[in-house]
Amino acid sequence: MFTFQINTDCLLLYISGPPVIILNINNVNRSIPNLNKVPDIICFQSFFEKSNIGCSSSNIYDIVGLISIIPNANKKMILATKIKKRWRISSTSKSIASAKKFCKLLANSRMIILERVRECNSNFLCAIAKCCSINTMSIEQDISKTYYTLRDAVKTIENDSAFEHLRNILSSHFTTYYKCLKCECTPSSLSNIYECICIYEPDTKHPPISAVPLASKNSMNLECSACNEKTENVILPMHTQIHHQYPSIIMYHLSRTTRQALKKLSIELNSPDMQCKYVYKPSSILLVDEYNSISVIKLQQNLVYNTSPYETSAVLSDDQINELCFAAQSVIVFLEQVKIDKFKSTDVL
């Protein structure tokens, strides 16, 4: 459960959304305009990191309760809760009949309680396993619950021994070096070592992709050895990454793609000592559309699986796959390591 501080002076990015969010409103001195219509839901997508990939319902919350203090002589505190789409005052158990009265309560609220109650039939854990050609039928009891987001599924994969094989083929081991916001130096003190499952994203720098940890992020309580600037829970800009071990399968995040682009896609990553080159080719894609649905496509056979647990398939043409890719909000390409090229000493120079 999170408590979000409403602060107009800065924007905080959150890793992912929990089932319940508490909005703590700490700025009560500013005038609030009259509300003509109270929203039924609130979408938090803009407050989450771009690596927070999930079904639409994972970012949508219903307002289910609020605590308000009426600005009069008594400053009475009122708790209002929503029960079957009707708002009730806790002290009287009476419904709020007037929309104007409820708007007044909301305008003077100090705390708003939101809950993620939207239904979702998709399952990111099953979809990941299918993209990695892992049979989930033998561990069906571990995948029965709903996994709304990619991060929810990765948390389970990293912490549940039943998914050890899946964890091993997806895990990366690398060091990320960050840039100081004050002096813009990149000392070794501003670095973190990660050994976890990541989502890889395109990068304009070298190397061409960067790894973003999904389930666990080390708290950024670091100190710059160059200027002694301390950072606490601040997202620092990444300078570079050095991989100590590449995964067997990479999850590569794209906003848009086509079947033809996937046929040409190839990722080459060099080892830290520049003695080996790891080559990855697409094998599957996971598509998340705007209708709360996940589809898995096996590229070699053009097979599509669109219903959890993704055991029933249909054959699609390249044009049909293009249509699915065009409608997708997020595309996760699963690239398998197909070969390792070892350089000669003369090739490195």
Image (spheres, rainbow, N blue to C red):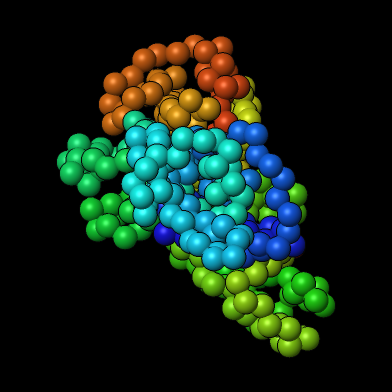
Residue 221, horizontal then vertical, whole percent: 59, 78
Taking the view exactly as shown, the residue that stands out farthest to the front is 73
Q: Quadrant of the N terminus?
A: bottom left
- Residue 300 vertical position relative to residue 273 in the rendered view, above or below: above
The answer to whether one can see residue 113 in this image is no
Q: Is residue 157 left or right of residue 100?
A: left
Query: Between 86 and 25, which is closer to the camera in this rendering?
Result: 86
Residue 199, horizontal then vertical, whole percent: 53, 50
| Residue located at (31% from left, 60% from top) | 159
Taking the view exactly as shown, the residue that stands out farthest to the right is 183
Looking at the rendering, which quadrant does residue 224 occupy?
bottom right
| Residue located at (23% from left, 40% from top) | 144
Query: Between 276 and 79, which is closer to the camera in this rendering?
Result: 79
- Residue 264 vertical position relative to residue 11 in the rendered view, above or below: above
| Residue located at (19% from left, 40% from top) | 140
The answer to whether one can see residue 61 in this image is yes
Q: Is residue 186 left or right of residue 273?
A: right
How many marks the image carries: the answer is 0
Q: Quadrant of the C terminus?
A: bottom right
Residue 272, horizontal then vertical, whole percent: 61, 65
| Residue located at (25% from left, 37% from top) | 135
Q: Is residue 82 left or right of residue 333?
A: left
Residue 285, horizontal then vertical, whole percent: 48, 32
